[in-house]
Amino acid sequence: MTSVGIIGDGVAGLTAAVALARRGFDVTVIGRGFRNTNSYLAQAGIALPILDGDSLRAHFIDTVRAGGYLNDEEAVWNVLSRASEAHDFLTSIGLEFETSETEGGHSFHRVFTIRNETGKHMTNVLHMAAREAGVNFLEGFVEELGVGDRRAYGVFLNGEFLKFDATVVASGGFAGLYRYTAGSPLTIGLLIGDAVVKGSPARDLEFVQFHPTGYIGENGVFLISEAVRGAGAKLVTEDGERFVNELSTRDIVARAIYRQMQDGKRVYLDATGVEDFKGRFPQIYAFLVNDGTDPSKDIIPVSPIAHYTMGGIAVDLWYRTAIRNLYAVGEAASNGFHGANRLASNSLLECVVSGLEVARTVARERPKVGEVPELPYAFDSLGDVDSIREVLWEHAGIVRTEEGLREGLRELGETDVDPRLKLLAEGVISCALVREESRGAHYREDFPVMRKVFERPSFFEGDCHL
């Protein structure tokens, strides 16, 4: 029986696990608990173009427009055309959506949600379905991929090698490499950097999405969903002045808030006019009240925070990497679906579609690793990860310049951190330097417009090339 190891227990990893186990594969999921994933924290929902009045074409146009026209169009069609399959898969395992809403960048109310804590319900149901399908679960930290001669043989878990015929990276992106993020602090992209070291290039690392409405409070950093703005909340300065269309794409709104803050103004989300805030957004309401803010009466201080990384291990339409028997799905992967900027709630759709698609790929290829050669293992410790967080936040954040990026590279060289994390951060900064334009989530103050010459993806293999 073909054995499959899946690193990551978010929506993409769990979907792949269920689909593979149902096909008779011996599946093992390795993670730190699905409650510690970004998928679990996902609030608003999953974008599905399946309602009357909506269309694949309308969703396609919204996705490409949000993506700065850098999207791989075949990848976009590939994902969106499987939305009905994704919906049917989720409902078949017991997920029940409550309603559909409009989010920034969408031209239709196609974001299916469950009490604005969709990820929590989705991961719970997927985890139960995986258990019922006979998936094995291991808790622990995967330090390295077991790769030799551009072929994957398994993983190193807590210092021990585990052999798998197929290895699927579903460990998320690297927004956790920024100082402020509402995501899981575990999403630092270690295996993305590891894959680059071992022969699989990364793609589009410079595109890091900042969510406009982060809440940095006494009890931590939290996310205030775009759906709150969709419900009518307004962005205002301390003077009560509105300054942006709240339902523009995230890059536009985040930069507008950033500009106000640079001018010394504080920015707030005014949700006092949102009817039944507590009932519609229970998770958000709970952490705000716990932190001393009542959204029915008080305006909410907000700030952009690192949220989602469009870049990841480069994969094809079938989620294969450049390393044989190694696959990547969800936010860990990049095939151009999101382009330069993710359209809101397309991420959970991609997670489900990529999980189902990689299961078909593995079932078609039936990989077998055979005898395992001696594999390199060099992990010691992650080192000072916070030093990288400071560098990226200060020099490769919402607004970038050549001077700041070069200073970031200099400071990065002085950090004492796992070399794979340093390499990944170098990829973000060097690709941001090479892309001398502003497109999607990448904004260069010294090159503030899109340039046709840069309408192509970047790839990083130690050097960045477009």
Image (cartoon, rainbow, N blue to C red):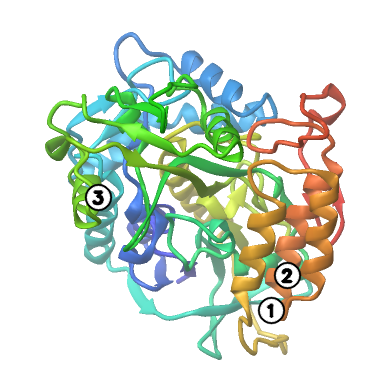
Callout 1 touching callout 2 (CB < 8 Å): yes
Give percent across and percent down for residue 443. 71, 36
Q: Quadrant of the C terminus?
A: top right
Neighbour tally class for label 1: few under 14, some 14-19, many 20 plus, Cα within 10 Å: some
Residue at 70% over, 29% down: 70
Residue at 19% over, 39% down: 115
The disc, 3 or 2, on the residue closer to the chain's N-terminal end is 3
Neighbour tally class for label 3: few under 14, some 14-19, many 20 plus, Cα within 10 Å: some
Give percent across and percent down for residue 91. 22, 39
Residue designated by label 3: 288
Residue designated by label 2: 422
Give percent across and percent down for residue 205. 70, 50
Residue positioned most to the top: 53
The quarter holding residue 242 reads top left
Give the side of residue 19 with respect to residue 75, left or right: left
Residue at 46% over, 39% down: 266
Residue 154 appears in the figure: yes
Residue designated by label 1: 417
